[in-house]
Each structure stands twice: as structure tokens, then as C-alpha cells.
Amino acid sequence: MQTLPNPTTNRPLTDTTIHRRKTRPVKVGNITIGGGYPVVVQSMINEDTLDIDGSVAAIRRLHEIGCEIVRVTVPSMAHAKALAEIKQKLVATYQPVPLVADVHHNGMKIALEVAKHVDKVRINPGLYVFEKAKNTEYSQAEFDEIGDKIRETLEPLVVSLRDQGKAMRIGVNHGSLAERMLFTYGDTPKGMVESALEFIRICESLDFRNIVISLKASRVPVMVAAYRLMVQRMDELKMDYPLHLGVTEAGDGEYGRIKSTAGIAPLLADGIGDTIRVSITESPEKEIPVCYSILQALGLRKTMVEYVACPSCGRTLFNLEEVLHKVRDATKHLTGLDIAVMGCIVNGPGEMADADYGYVGKQPGFISLYRGREEIKKVPESEGVTELINLIKADDRWIDP
Ligand code: SF4
């Protein structure tokens, strides 16, 4: 049977490997985004940056649980200067943490100050140069005139980051597109992409390429379309900038997590994306496990044990939920292993998805332990978890928690 290629990746539909888009490596402190490095996890503290000790503690809390790049907000010059102290306290009391500063409206002077203290500066093209609302179409001359003003404003920051070997994120947001982009291209993924390209071209003309691009939206289909279009345009233009993925204003709770995943995961599955942030309306520490779960589910990073478990049904021979909890409690520190817990031998062994070990209902009161697809032994259910641990120990794959 002939299989047609995946229309997005142009790879055979039978291909189960994620082929990540080739991007240039962009260094942010001691972390590299792109260039084939693992997808980087980032988040943002919500402390006021003027609260030095509070910010240092928040950055450290995030970094300790796996957030590899931490963003801080810099709404004023005082905040930008505070970053010098935050950075120095982090180094003195903990370790250097890759930091990104988010610069807001008309932020040129603030950006120049903060660029001295952080590893990456994030600017929003829609807000960087103030444009008075015009509410009519822009002539080419007017469009270009604002373009010149943007170049003039952006140049000192680009030169500063370039000369210090630091990075920039051109972070376009669907909700804050520049006026003239809105009138020229509409409130569309195309407008978002053109807005990013305008800033990229200025950077390139100054020989600065330590750039990461994001095109976030709160609507998943808009965000997904914008990133896909950006990739197509960059391919046409022979650009290889890494992409930062995220859904903005995703909300909280289960829906916020699902909405973020719905936007980020399809892109990653097509090989698009070098760093992710899950933005949920909860404490930033709650974002990190979601990022890791997305990456683990796609096989892009392995930060925990992968449990394969059936949903249970009328054939289930033990309390599956309870047993899964027990197995997880005993083995969750064995990062790298895949462990299956299946309710019966009818479908269980075949559906364990090549797990390293399997715990499968055999007959009432008994379970079977598997190594890969091989049945190793039948044991009373009451000894199941202990015997699973013994099997892993016998294979020399056990480590004490
Ligand atoms: S593995 Fe067995 S118990 Fe589990 S859902 Fe499938 S048939 Fe039911």
C-alpha cells in the first residue's frame, strides 16, 4: 500500500519518529535553545522585581524543580536596575540561573539597562515602539516611516545584546499586534508572522542572530496556524531561528492544562518548537510538571517513569487504580523505565507497548510479571509489588529511592 506523506512534515505517515526542525543554537546563560538540544522548559515568576529577596527565592524555587530559564518582568527603570542585585544574590546564595527580562511599552532605555544584567531580553514588536492609533489604512510611506522609527529604536538594544553575546526573543502576541500590521494584514497569523519578520530583518542587518521567536495567541487554532506559517516563511527565507511555543491566557485547572497542551503538542509532534512555556493562572511552580508531561508524552524528554496502564474493564482481575498507585509509589524514582500495569492477560501483554516491565492480572488472586514481552513468573497478587521490585533488582536496574 502506498502511503502519502504527512502534509505538514512531508514525511511518510508510517514514520513514528519526531524529526525536529533544524534550528540554530541560541545560548541563554548556560542553556542552549535550538540546535538539536532538548526542548527547554521555561516559566515566569510573578513577584514584583523590586522585591529582591522575594524574586531571588521565586527564581530559585522554579529552577530547583526543573525550570531551565526564568523570566522576570521589568516595567520600569527601577525594576531593570533591581535585576543587577537579583543576579548577584542568585550567584552568591545559589547559582547563576538563565534569566530573561520582559520589556514593555516604549521600553528602549529599560531594555538597554536590563540587557546588562540578564541573558535574554524579550520584546513585543506590537508594543516596543508607541504608535498613535490611526484607524485608517497606512500608505506605504507611512508604513515605512514607522519601520524606520522601529529600526532606530531597536538598534541600540540589538547592538548591546550582540556585543555581549546575549539573546533576544521576538515575542509577538496576537492580542497586541501593532496598529499598522493590523490594518495591513488583519488580525491574522499572517500579521503576526510579518510583524516578527520585520524585527528579524532589522536584527540580521546588524549581524545579530541570537534570536528566538514566539507567536502566541489565546486561541489554539490561531497560535498553531501562526507557528506553522512562520516555519514556512522561515524556510522560504532560509532562516533557522528556534521557536518558543505557548498558548497565552490559557486559564487555570484542568482546562488550562489541556488548552496549553492542545496548542503546544501538535507543533512539537511535527518537529516544531525548541522551548515551551505553559502559562496557567496558578503559581508558576504548577507549570513545570505540565511542560514535562507534554515532553515525556511525546518522547522528547524523559524525566519520569512512563506508566502504561489499561483503563480496566469487566475482565480486570484486581483493583487496577489501587495497584497502579502502589506500583507508582514503589518505582516512581526509576526515571527512564517504562512499566505497564494491565488488568488481564487477554489484551494486557499485547498492549503493554514494549514496556520494560509488566504487571498483569493472570487469574483471580494471581498476577504475572513480565520483562518486555516475556512472562517471567506468576505470583500471588499480595506479593506482586515486592516481586516486581525483586525482578528489577535482579536485572540490576533498581536504585534505592
Ligand atoms: S487489558 Fe484486560 S482488563 Fe485491561 S482494559 Fe484491556 S481487556 Fe480490560
Image (cartoon, rainbow, N blue to C red):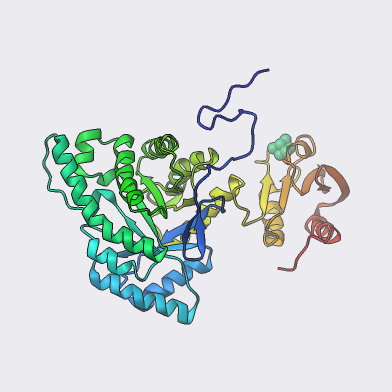
Judged left or right of residue 244, residue 191 is left
Quarter occupied by residue 362 = top right
Name the residue rendered at 62%, 46% in the picture.
299
338 vs 237, nearest the viewer: 237
* Position of residue 350 in the picture relative to residue 322 (left or right): right
Q: Does residue 345 sit above or below 282 in this rendering?
A: above
What percent of the width, then of the height, locates residue 46? 35, 65
Instruction: Give ligand 1's quarter of the image.
Output: top right
Q: Position of residue 56 (x, y in %)?
A: 41, 74
Left or right of 399, for residue 74? left
Residue 245 falls left or right of residue 12: left
On the question of residue 67 being in view, the answer is no
Q: Residue at the location (33% across, 49% down)?
A: 205
How many numbered circles are shown? Answer: 0
Front residue of 71/401: it is 71
In the figure, 394 relative to 58: above or below? above
In percent of the image, x 43 and y 69: which residue is there? Answer: 59
Quadrant the N terminus occupies: top right
The extreme bottom residue here reads 92
Taking the image as drawn, is residue 321 in sight? yes
- Looking at the picture, tell me which residue is in the foreground, 306 or 363: 306
From what the image shows, is residue 187 above or below residue 160? above
Q: Position of residue 181 (x, y in %)?
A: 23, 39
Q: Quadrant of the C terminus?
A: bottom right
Looking at the image, which is closer to me, 331 or 278?
278
Place of residue 293 in the rendered image (x, y in percent of width and height, measured from the top left): 56, 51
Q: Residue at horizontal 68%, vertical 52%?
A: 324
**In the current view of this chain or complex, which residue is farthest to the right?**
377
